[in-house]
Image: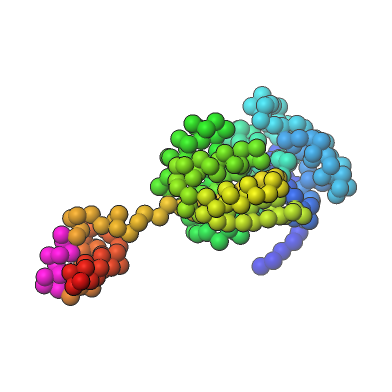
Amino acid sequence: MSQHNQVAIQPSTLYVVPTPIGNLGDITQRALDVLGAVDLIAAEDTRHTGLLLQHFAINAQLFALHDHNEQAKADSLIAKLQDGHSIALVSDAGTPLINDPGYHLVRRCRESGIRVIPLPGACAAITAMSAAGLPSDRFCYEGFLPAKTKSRCDTLRALETEPRTLIFYESTHRLLDSLQDMVTVWGAERYVVLARELTKTWENIYGAPVGELLSWIKEDEVRRKGEMVLVVEGYKAPESAELSPESLRTLALLHKELPLKKAAALAAEIHGVKKNALYKYALEQQQDDQE
């Protein structure tokens, strides 16, 4: 049932509030209500958030909370919450804690028995995933790849056989290096979608095998500028790689007494492999024998 009520701000409560990743129209009415009613807003960059609040004519007290001071300032905010204050946590764009500050504060709130209320809203990773055209039933978010080549390649090798769709954030000055390392580690055929400047005027979403994507980006310097998300197809094992010698021997033995489809089904169940892969293999073998 759809319902909209004026927000009743709770005392001693931390609100986790997403903000737009580009288009100001994406902010929710509930987010505006919370930002306009809390006692304090903890912001990654008070100047950046100040411009957002000014646009929506919201007057609020701001408190700087960023990567470099979060652990030191968490105690101060916990004390304010325990005294009955309400606080909204925001980052520069998107959902706080998703590659943005907030983890230490939220963790401390949970440990101190302070209520944390999350609001739904903009997130670049999910926005890109929804338009990538890659499997979305299972995916994993990996944030930014390491800045140094060796560490980046080590990370990519660790993810080489990850079957889930992968989501990365990437910066303008490291995009080409990261894509080149993907080609080196994974091969040029792994499908990658570049989602750039999402929700903004120059939004662009383009997918191709990573080798082709790298060439496409090099054709135009503009294609490597802005805020970027990379959505990567998960690893797909070749069907033949699943067929162990044991499964093939079982198939051959069963096929002496049973029709091929039945033999393939039983062998697949015994060895935990795909029935279609066994059936296809047996048909190809039969064709080879007849030639």
In magenta, the rendered stretch is: 249-258
**Residue 128: x, y in percent?**
62, 54
Left or right: residue 86 versus residue 1 is right
Residue 11 percent across, percent down from the top left: 73, 41
116 left or right, relative to 53 = left
Q: Which of these two is toward me, 12 or 137?
A: 137
Residue drawn at x 19%, y 60% is 248
The quarter of the rendered structure image containing the C terminus is bottom left
In the image: residue 245, left or right of residue 191: left
List x then y, in percent, for residue 5. Answer: 76, 59
Closest to the observer, 46 or 285: 285
Quarter of the image containing the N terminus? bottom right
Question: Which residue does the image show at 61% across and 42% down from the upper left?
Answer: 175
| Residue pictured at 58% horizontal, 56% vertical | 207
Q: Is residue 89 in sight in this rendering?
A: yes
Residue 8 shows in this picture: no
| Res. 43 image quadrant | top right
- Main SS, magenta residues: helix
> Which residue occupies 61% across, 32% down?
104
Q: Nearer the viewer, residue 83 or 29?
A: 29
Q: Is residue 58 in the magenta section? A: no
Which image quadrant is residue 115 in?
Answer: top right
Q: Residue furthest bottom?
A: 259
